[in-house]
Every structure is written in structure tokens, then in C-alpha cells.
Image (tube, rainbow, N blue to C red):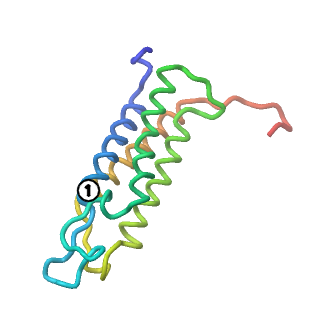
Amino acid sequence: MNLSRLGRGELLAVLGGLLLAIGVFLPWYGTNPDNRNANLDGASGTFSCWEAHPILRWLLLAAALAPLILAWIILRDHQLSWPRGEMTAVVGMIALVLVLYVGLVDRPGEPSGQISLKYGWFVALLGIAAIIVGGAMRAGGTERPRKPPGVL
């Protein structure tokens, strides 16, 4: 394994994956302490993604692994049928949509207007952005092989 094969894109994506993994365990939501009816699953206080989303937490941790898999592929010089980094960027985009949805559109808790976003949500969002940019940087640096006309 030659560590010099890893470029800035892969290192940025790995950093983003680590930020996303850490962000899952940081506080994402906080209930309004002035409103005694504000709760998330019957409890008040601050909640991490790990506590609030039983399925999404596993999806985000899987997305955090994508840059590490990209780095492994590059270090081992595995051949792929698609540009390296492309799948990592796609996984990052899916994670971005999921995090934006649970943070902005369908925030957990009752009433949802009394649940605020905490810094862990923003850390996860920053990590996802780094995954997308790092994967795109790697995919953009790889030239696609040309196929003859009429071949899909």
C-alpha cells in the first residue's frame, strides 16, 4: 500500500466521514425549556441523532464508511467499472437529502416548532459536504473510458 496515492479529495472525504460519524453522537435537537409541552418521545432536553432516529443512525454511519472504502480502493489500486469517487459522492448526496429532511422538513418531536437544531446537526452537515466535495474531486480527476458507438 502506497499512502502517497491518496490525494486531497480522498483526504477531505475521509475527514468528512469522520465528522459525520462523530456528528451522529452529538446533540442534534433540543426542546424549548420554556414550553413544558415540548418533547421528543415524551422526554425533554437535548437529543443526538443516535437517540432520535433508530434507522437513520445506521444509514448515516454506513455513509460515513464510504470515504474509507474509497481510500481502501485507491490504496489497493482496485479496478472499478465507474470512476473512483463517484459512488462516494452519490452516497454523500443521499445522506445530505436525509439529514436536510429530518432537520428542516420533518423534525421529530411535539410540537415540531418547539424543537431546535443543535450543533451536532451542523457538524454532520459539514461532514456530508466534505464527503460530497472529496468524492467529486476524485471522480472529476478520473477520465472515463470511451466506448465504441452503439455500446451501452
- Residue at 35%, 72% (x, y): give it: 108
Q: Quadrant of residue 12?
A: top left
Viewer-proximal residue, 125 or 137? 125
Q: Nearer the viewer, residue 116 or 148?
A: 116
Horizontal side of 43 relative to 59 (left or right) equals left
Give percent across and percent down for residue 22.
28, 46
Q: Secondary structure at mark 1?
A: helix
Residue 30 in the image, given as x and y percentages of width and height: 22, 69
Residue 120 placement (x, y as % from top left): 26, 56
- Residue at x-position 40% and y-position 63%: 100
User: Is residue 35 positioned above or below 21 on the image?
Assistant: below
Q: Residue furthest front?
A: 42
Residue 8, by quadrant, is: top left
Q: Which residue is mark 1?
A: 120
User: How many labels, in total?
Assistant: 1
Q: Is residue 70 left or right of residue 130?
A: right
Q: Tag 1: Cα neighbours inside 10 Å, few (<14), some, or many (≥20)?
A: many
Q: Point out the residue furthest to the left here.
A: 34
User: Which residue is rendered at x = 39% and y = 49% of the image?
Assistant: 128
Q: Quadrant of residue 114?
A: bottom left
Amino acid bearing label 1: Gly
Location of the C terminus (image quadrant): top right
Q: In this view, which residue lies farthest toward the top?
A: 2
Residue 26: horizontal and vertical position, in percent?
24, 54
On the rendered image, what quadrant is the N terminus found in?
top left
Looking at the image, which residue is at 23% across and 74% down?
Answer: 43
From the viewer's perspective, tell me whether residue 45 is left or right of residue 128. left
